[in-house]
Image (cartoon, grey):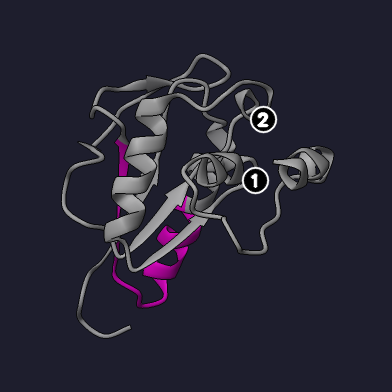
Amino acid sequence: MGSATHRVAILVYDGVKLLDVVGPAEVFGEANRIGADYTIALVSPTGADVTSSIGIRIAVDAAATEPAPDTFLVAGADLYPRTPVPRDLIEATRTLAGRAGRVASICTGAFILGAAGLLDGKRATTHWKVAHELAAR
């Protein structure tokens, strides 16, 4: 990967699935062990710490308005698709995606990308149990 540091921002919010945060973070950490140079930041819409779906508090590094990431990931949650995505989460997603070099989601994070209009005209997938709901939206 060379000597340039690549910034990875993972969007977290109250109710986020802890596995959808730590799993991807571990993957980038392992890549660093074999020569990559990723820095990983957890970001929330306001920069405030959040609580995962199982009640574990997650310390956040920055707000969504912080420097542009090279890679932007949206972690999933059981909340979406069951409930509408809040406006602040949609706006944070649009802000980060608009400045990122690449954008992806983990599992049901696709519902947040969809609510932000970032999947319009694109093929997308999510967890098989809710794929029909993503298709309907």
x and y, in percent, of residue 95 in the image? 29, 47
Residue that appears at 47% across and 18% down: 56
**68 displayed left or right of 93:** left
Q: Is residue 53 shown above or below 90? A: above
Residue that appears at 82% across and 42% down: 132
**43 displayed left or right of 123:** left
x and y, in percent, of residue 59 in the image? 30, 28
Residue that appears at 22% across and 57% down: 68
Residue 6 visible somewhere in the drawing: yes
Q: Which mark is residue 107?
A: 1
- Return the residue at label 2: 81
Reply yes or no: does residue 128 show up in magenta: no
User: Depth check: 89 or 115 in front?
Assistant: 115
Q: Amino acid at mark 2?
A: Pro
> Which quarter of the rendered picture does the C terminus lie within?
top right
> Which quarter of the rendered picture does the N terminus lie within?
bottom left
Can you tell which of label 2 and label 1 is closer to the viewer? Answer: 2
Q: Is residue 54 shown above or below 30? A: above
User: Depth check: 88 or 17 in front?
Assistant: 88
Q: Which mark is residue 96?
A: none
Stretch of the chain drawn in magenta: 25-43
x and y, in percent, of residue 2 in the image? 26, 85
User: Depth check: 24 or 136 in front?
Assistant: 136
